[in-house]
Amino acid sequence: MLVSDAIGNSGVLRLGNDDNRLSSLIIRNRLGKIALAIGLAAVLIGCKQDKPVEQVIRPVKAIIAQEQAPERSRTFSGNVRARIESPLGFRVAGKIMERLVNIGDKIAVGQVIAKLDETDLKLSENSARAAVESARTRLDVARDALNRAKALLPNGYIPKATVDQRQLEFDAAKASLESTEAQARQAENATSYAALASDKAGIVTAVNAEPGQVVAAGAPVVMLAEAGEIEVALNVPEQEVTHLSAGQRVALELWADQDVRAEGRIREIGGQADSGSRTYSVRISVMDPPSAMRLGMTATATLALGADEPHVVIPVTALTQVQGRDAVFVADRTTQTVTPRFVEKAGIGPDGIKLRDGVKAGDVVVTGGVQFLIDGMKVRLPKEVLQTASAGPSP
């Protein structure tokens, strides 16, 4: 049928009967395909809903938390040294001609350590002695003049003012002689200072000058560790020094030979921290030091720091973050499910992290695989944890 024949007077396109039947067949075919697809989807969904979903049980590592409050102690290393170490130097300046000791030598009282060139000192001494003789001669002349004046005064041969003048000259000459004699003694002492002698017995621990070197007065030539009391010097960090006190007993032992032990007492605690290390100097006097303990050796001191506050220690691997806060996962021994619990740290110890709050003694804390856990997840606890739990009451 032509399109022009299907157009009526109204101008509307009219289809014939054959065309209507063809359109109906096409629509019914399409609707059938849609219904078939919907039916297949429903069947598939029904199959999925009927199949049970298996929950994954994740094996984890865990420990049973225990509360601790031990007596704290720490071991520090220090050096064995004399209580008094003195730098020895010449009391006058000069050139060192001879040094008679070396590091490690034992020094007796009065033993000569080094000598200076005393040429200039001898010249100064001779000059002072000559000045003494000159002053003594002037004093003799002034004495004779005063005696003559006193003899002539009673007969009126000289006035009283002349006698007073002679007395003044005599007094000045006497004072000058005393001054030059003092200077001569100083020169003699300076000459004797050319030989550096020790006034204490001890051991030479350092040498700071060599023969031929010109040194100033007081410049250290050797370091002398005085014989007698020895001590152990060590440095303690600021967080621990507050637990120490003078007179506290300390256990000491040598690093080279741990069988050599001694007892000490804290003699001195530094009042100010070292600017570089931020540690405080602690001096420990050694009571009855063994003969094997020598100066310069390394010794270890075990310091008692008092009882620690009650806490629970967990491994570092047990700590995680939940909602931006420190937390651990605690497992229920009956249901073997885990629950996150927020904790408060109290510091770090040698065995792990100290917890002040959040975990109590007897709790089962997961220590491995915490990054895969969520609240309420079922886990498989280690057999040793379950056996330990069955031996005691459940928390």
Image (cartoon, grey):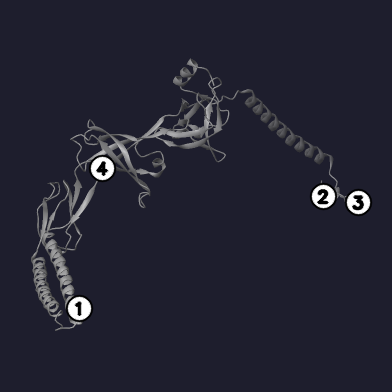
Q: Helix or strand or loop: what does disc 2 sit on?
A: loop
Position of residue 169 relative to residue 294, above or below, is below
Mark 4 closeness class: few <14, some 14–19, many ≥20 residues within 10 Å: some
* Residue position marked by numbered label 4 in the rendering: 79
**Marker disc for residue 180:** none
Q: Earlier in the sequence, mark 3 or mark 2?
A: 2
Q: CA distance from mark 3 to mark 4?
A: 121 Å
The three-letter amino acid code for the residue at tag 3 is Ser
* Residue position marked by numbered label 3 in the rendering: 10
Residue 166 horizontal/vertical position (percent): 16, 78
Dots 1, 2 in contact, CB < 8 A = no
The image quadrant of residue 34 is top right
Mark 2 closeness class: few <14, some 14–19, many ≥20 residues within 10 Å: few
From the viewer's perspective, is the residue at label 3 or at label 4 nearer? 4
**Marker disc for residue 164:** 1
Depth check: give the residue in front, 238 or 145.
Answer: 145
From the viewer's perspective, is the residue at label 1 or at label 4 nearer? 1
Residue 153 horizontal/vertical position (percent): 15, 80
Left or right of 6? Residue 77 is left
